[in-house]
Amino acid sequence: MLAFHLLDVRPAIKARKKKPQEDVISHLLGLKYSEPEILTECVTYAAAGMVTTREFISMAAWHFLEHPELRDRYMAASEAERTEMLHEVLRIEPVVGNLYRRATADIPLQSQGKSVVIPNGALINLHVYAANADQTVVGEEPLSLCPERKLNGDRIATMLMGFGDGTHRCPGSFLAIQETDIFLHRLLALPNLSIERPPTLTWNDISTGYELRKFMLKLEDKTA
């Protein structure tokens, strides 16, 4: 962390103070953020975004390689259709399992005929897995991967809470999906690609999400 701060973040801060640009550090300097606060934001944008995208790429590859019909459909689909398929994978396999938010005012809610008020200042634990599997929104078999799933409701993203929502929605969501699509479309195009060893699945308490390790693939030479 110290090396990242001294070799990357601090020189960037110095450069943006002299010549601001359309980037995160210039924006934070405009908001009078301190150097440690800017470092925290850089770690969040860079490291956190990289790690979560890496885990999602592995999870999506696992789904497609275990289900040849999904892989074939993904490879034959347009970019827009592939994006929707990746959104559906993210819906059932969100990389971050819980989001914590602090209420800045009383929040009245209506649900199933009941009225609830979340008081100002309360810490809200948004359980992403439960929200993404809400049958009143996603319909039957909420934990199944269904590329053409019909959602019930207005203005609901196809990945639901997979990227969060509101002002704190993941700022790199489009980049993460595009990176995943570029990599997987080339990887899955390799002939005779299969899983040699499924990944080990562990849980990260900090991100409240999964980690996949030792995921081994192989290319079989069927011409021999």
Image (spheres, rainbow, N blue to C red):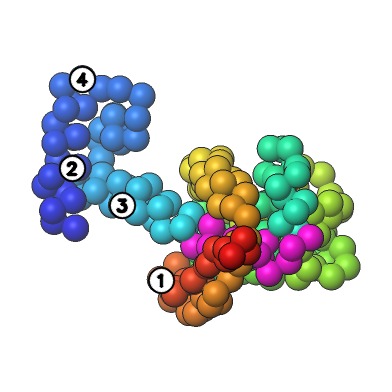
Quadrant in the picture for residue 20: top left
Q: Residue at x 44, y 73 (%)?
A: 213
Residue type at mark 2?
Asp
Marker disc for residue 8: 2
Marker disc for residue 131: none
Position of 98 compared to 214: left or right? right
Q: Give the magenta part as a residue range.
A: 55-69
Query: Counting residues from the N terminus, which is met first, the one under dot 4 or under dot 2?
Result: 2
Q: Which residue is mark 3?
A: 43
Query: Counting residues from the N terminus, which is met first, the one under dot 3 or under dot 4?
Result: 4
Residue 49 location in percent, x, y?
A: 42, 51
Residue type at mark 4?
Lys
| Helix, strand or loop under label 1 | loop
Q: Which residue is mark 1?
A: 206
Q: Which residue is mark 4?
A: 19
Q: Residues within 10 Å of mark 3 (few under 14, many from 20)?
A: some
Query: Counting residues from the N terminus, which is met first, the one under dot 2 or under dot 1?
Result: 2
CA–CA distance in space, label 1 to label 4? 36 Å
- Residue 197 part of the magenta-drawn span: no
From the image, give the main secondary structure of the stretch colored magenta: helix
Image quarter of the C terminus = bottom right
Residue type at mark 1?
Ile
Q: Observer-nearest residue: 134 or 106?
A: 134
Query: Counting residues from the N terminus, which is met first, the one under dot 1 or under dot 4?
Result: 4
Q: Is residue 129 visible?
A: yes
Quadrant in the picture for residue 142: bottom right
